[in-house]
Amino acid sequence: MGIEQWAVTGGSWGSCVAVAYAEAHAARCLGLLLVSTWLCRAKDTDWWFQGVRTVFPEVWEQFASCVPANKRPNLLASYCDAILHGTDTEKANQMARQLYLYEEAFMRFEAPMAPPPEDNAIRYGRIFAHYASNGFFLKDAQLLEDAMAIADLPVEMVTGRYDMCTTPDNAFDLKEKLPNAVLTIVPGAGHNPMETALARACIGAAERLYKSINSKFGSVSYG
């Protein structure tokens, strides 16, 4: 496409991809805007499958009820095996759908006006299971270990104080590796960037990043 350098942005899983890309191709990056940062460490995945019960016990119990009691200490393996390797297609689709609905149930700070759309629920669940079963194709803590590669780039991070999907310690731990980065933890916000408080913070972060890039690299233009 003829693009030599660009600012890279991503939210949630996209933030993980953005950081991984920037660390591998730092010379191509003008800066980073990361929303609801997720580092995909083993502890982060364990929170997603097991730890959510701390705050959403009824949601987790519904999620875990699809798995025999003796296998619930490792819901990741149980779900991934059933979805990806199970011989019962109907059961596999049911669990892929449940994986999608589980995340939808705890990713918002503000209660949604309507149930989540399910058009792509099964597809989502299968893709998520594929990545999760492969450790998201990253070494544990890889993004933190390689953070030195982007230490000189302008970086803005925005995360909700009550993000139960990609908890704020993800962004905080990355910020500790990037002393020049700006981290905004938004009160009254969860995971969904379309919610008012998080959306406003993202706009402010984007404006600051643009100014930082201009200051560091000279005048750049949108588009």
Image (spheres, grey):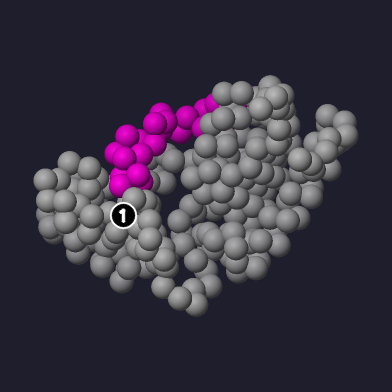
Residue at the location (73% across, 51% down)?
205
Residue at the location (37% across, 63% down)?
118
Local secondary structure at mark 1: helix
Residue 62 lies, in percent from the top left, at 26, 67
The residue to which callout 1 is attached is: 122
Residue at the location (41% across, 73% down)?
115
> Looking at the picture, which amino acid does disc 1 mark?
Ile
Query: Where 199 falls versus 42 (above or below)?
Result: below
Query: Where 3 falls versus 116 (above or below)?
Result: above
Residue 50 lies in quadrant: bottom left
Q: Main secondary structure of the magenta part?
A: helix
Residue at the location (64% across, 52% down)?
158
Residue 137 lies, in percent from the top left, at 39, 31
The magenta stretch spans residue 138 = yes
The magenta stretch spans residue 142 = yes
From the viewer's perspective, is 193 left or right of 184? left
Residue 12 lies, in percent from the top left, at 52, 49
Over which residues does the magenta segment extend? 126-149
Q: Nearer the viewer, residue 50 or 208?
A: 208
Residue 25 lies in quadrant: top right
Which of the image's four quarters has the C terminus?
A: top right
Which of the image's four quarters has the N terminus?
A: top right
